Each structure stands twice: as C-alpha cells, then as structure tokens.
Image (tube, coloured by chain):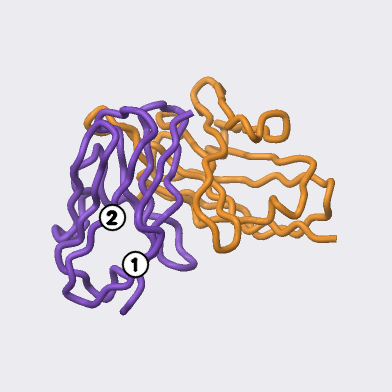
Chain colours: A orange, B purple
Amino acid sequence: QVQLVQSGAEVKKPGASVKVSCKASGYTFTGYQIHWVRQAPGQGLEWMGWMNPNNGGRNYAQRFQGRVTMTRDTSISTAYMEVSMLTSDDTAVYYCARVVVVAATPHIDYWGQGSLVTVSS
Amino acid sequence: DIQMTQSPSSLSASVGDRVTIACRASQSIGNYLNWYQQKPGEAPKVLIYAASNLQSGVPSRFSGSGSGTDFILTISSLQPEDFATYYCQQSYSTPTLTFGQGTKVEIK
C-alpha cells in the first residue's frame, strides 16, 4: 500500500534551518509529484511547493522563494524539504503529499503523517 | 495568483442536517477543484476531485458541484463523523496548488 512516512518532530532556534524527510513506499517514487503543505497551529493549509522526483524539477510558492529547498534521493525513494532562516511564524506541521492526476485534474491522494517543527528561543 | 475563498468560515449543524459549503475562485478554473476533509490531529483526505467526482471509499452523502468560479460541497445528511474542517483546493494553475481558508463544521 502507498505510504509516505515523515521524519519526527523538531525544535529549532530562530535563524536555524530544518530538514524534513518523506520516505515513499508502495509505488514508483519517480512517477508522481511530491508537494509540501504546512499548517500553523489552529490555521489552514498552506501550499509551499512541489518537486518532480523523476528529474528533480521544482517550484516554490513565492513567499518561500530563497528560503525553501526541495530535493530527493531516488535510490531510497525519499524527498526532503529544508527551510532556512526560521522564525516563530514557521512553527507548523509540515506535510509531504503525493499528487495524482485523475480526470485530467491533479489532486492529493496520499499524505504523510506530518512533521511538527517548533521554532522557539 | 488564484485566490480561493470559502464561506462560511464555520457553521453549526445537527446530525441529519443538509450542509452546504461554498468555494469561490478569483478567476475561472474550469472544474479543477478538489475538496478535502481534515479532522483534528490528522492529515487531510480527499473527498471530491474535479469538482464533482467522488473519491473511492467516500460516502455518497458527500457531493460536489460547480464550475468556473463557484463551487459547492454538499453533505446530504450530516453524520457524527463528519464534524471536521473542509478545504477546497484549485489545481488549475498546477503545479501550484491553492487552498481555501477552510470551513469548520461544528455540532449544534
């Protein structure tokens, strides 16, 4: 069965960086886009960007440009997202998600369990 | 950028009620509209894709309609397990995805 298993919770100080991993199993890793979505406490879902695991192509939401890097290691079917220059506003649960195209419409069909990142001095 | 606006932001309803949630796009997005349900402490799950297609395994009391800029999620008879937050999401500008701000469905 398809699974996306993310790395555990992290506590970081302001100004630091955090790297979250997302290990895929149960499907061909290079066949589907991986997107990253975050959710601050009590808030809604915020799309951060996406990556094509096949060729490494990527695109980030404008507000994260210059601060977010998405990478992958196809040998272990794992995607990574690194956020730098953390502030308290980056405290959130970070999700990786697989996008599938059905009826010509992309949508997220599988989500990781989420990784809580807390930024605190 | 395409903006997605949901209404209402929250609602109170009773078991058995018919519930509708609206989602409006800032420009026409055809039928590139998906609906997700999220319960506290869980990842979201897709209910409806391409505006009106029911995801496999989702109860038939959920339905979606609309095209262009205006969309509706309907729950025909609210069940206890349906109390959750619902999000619309556009994929017209894929790979960029945009979510609405969410609608919280609470028990009256």
Nearer to me, B106 or A24: B106
Q: In front here: B60 or A100?
A: B60
Q: Which mark is residue A31?
A: none
Seen at 30% across and 33% down, the residue is B32
- Name the spot of residue B60 as percent of width and height, x first: 14, 58
> What kind of residue is marked 2?
Ile
Res. B29 image quadrant: top left
Q: Secondary structure under badge 1?
A: strand
Q: Is residue A40 above or below residue A34?
A: below
- Residue A11 horizontal side relative to residue A37, left or right: right
The disc label shown at residue B11, or none = 1
Read off the residue under disc 2. Answer: B21
Neighbor class of circle 2 (other Cα within 10 Å; few <14, some 14-19, many 20+) is: many
* Residue positioned 35% across, 53% down in the render: B7
- Residue nearest the viewer, comparing B78 with A11: B78
Task: Kindly identify which chain the residue marked by label 1 belongs to.
Answer: B
Decide: few, some or many residues near mark 1? Use Cα within 10 Å; few <14, some 14-19, many ≥20. some
